[in-house]
Image: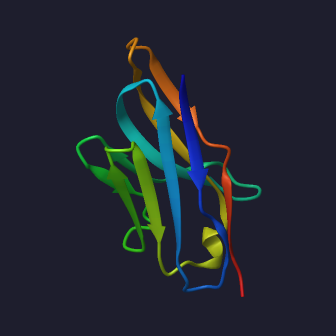
Amino acid sequence: QVQLVESGGGLVQPGESLRLSCTVSGSIFGINVMGWYRQAPGKQRELVARITSIGDSNYADSVRGRFTISRFNVGNTATLQMNSLKPEDTAVYSCNAEGSDYALKRFNLWGQGTQVTVSS
């Protein structure tokens, strides 16, 4: 069985930083893509950043240059370093991982979500 656990988030002031972490564990054959999405109240969920198994990454225009997604294949962990946070970054952030287990069964996992609030 494959599981995904998120950590991080919290309340910060504008301009401050936070780091989110996401770890996938279990009978993992490989993880193709890991990513972070966010959903603000009254808005649709949007992609924040994603990274492939070979390190190719892409970002939402609104966070490019401020956020950095990193992946550590040993430990199957992805982190999202968020710098220069703005009030409009306030949202519930969720991690997503797509891959296959040792039975070569594909999985698409979502975390429970973690609240990020940027407010003075």
Q: Residue at x 55, y 86 (%)?
A: 15
Q: Quick one: 25 or 99, which is closer to the camera?
A: 25
- Give the quarter of the image for residue 38: bottom right
x and y percentages locating residue 35 in the rendered image: 45, 47
Answer above or below: position of 67 versus 3.
below
Q: Is any atom of residue 62 visible in this view?
A: no
Task: Say how the picture is coloured.
Answer: rainbow
**In the picture, which quadrant includes the C terminus?**
bottom right
- Give the quarter of the image for residue 60: bottom left
Residue 108 horizontal side relative to residue 28, left or right: right
Residue 113 horizontal side relative to residue 5, left or right: right
Q: Residue at x 63, y 65 (%)?
A: 9
Answer above or below: position of 52 versus 115.
above
Q: Which residue is outermost to the top?
A: 103
Q: Is any atom of residue 120 visible in this view?
A: yes
Q: Quick one: 34 or 59, which is closer to the camera?
A: 34
Q: Quick one: 13 or 38, which is closer to the camera?
A: 13
x and y percentages locating residue 68 in the rendered image: 38, 65
Q: Residue at x 59, y 56 (%)?
A: 7
x and y percentages locating residue 78 in the rendered image: 42, 51
**In the picture, which quadrant includes the N terminus?**
top right
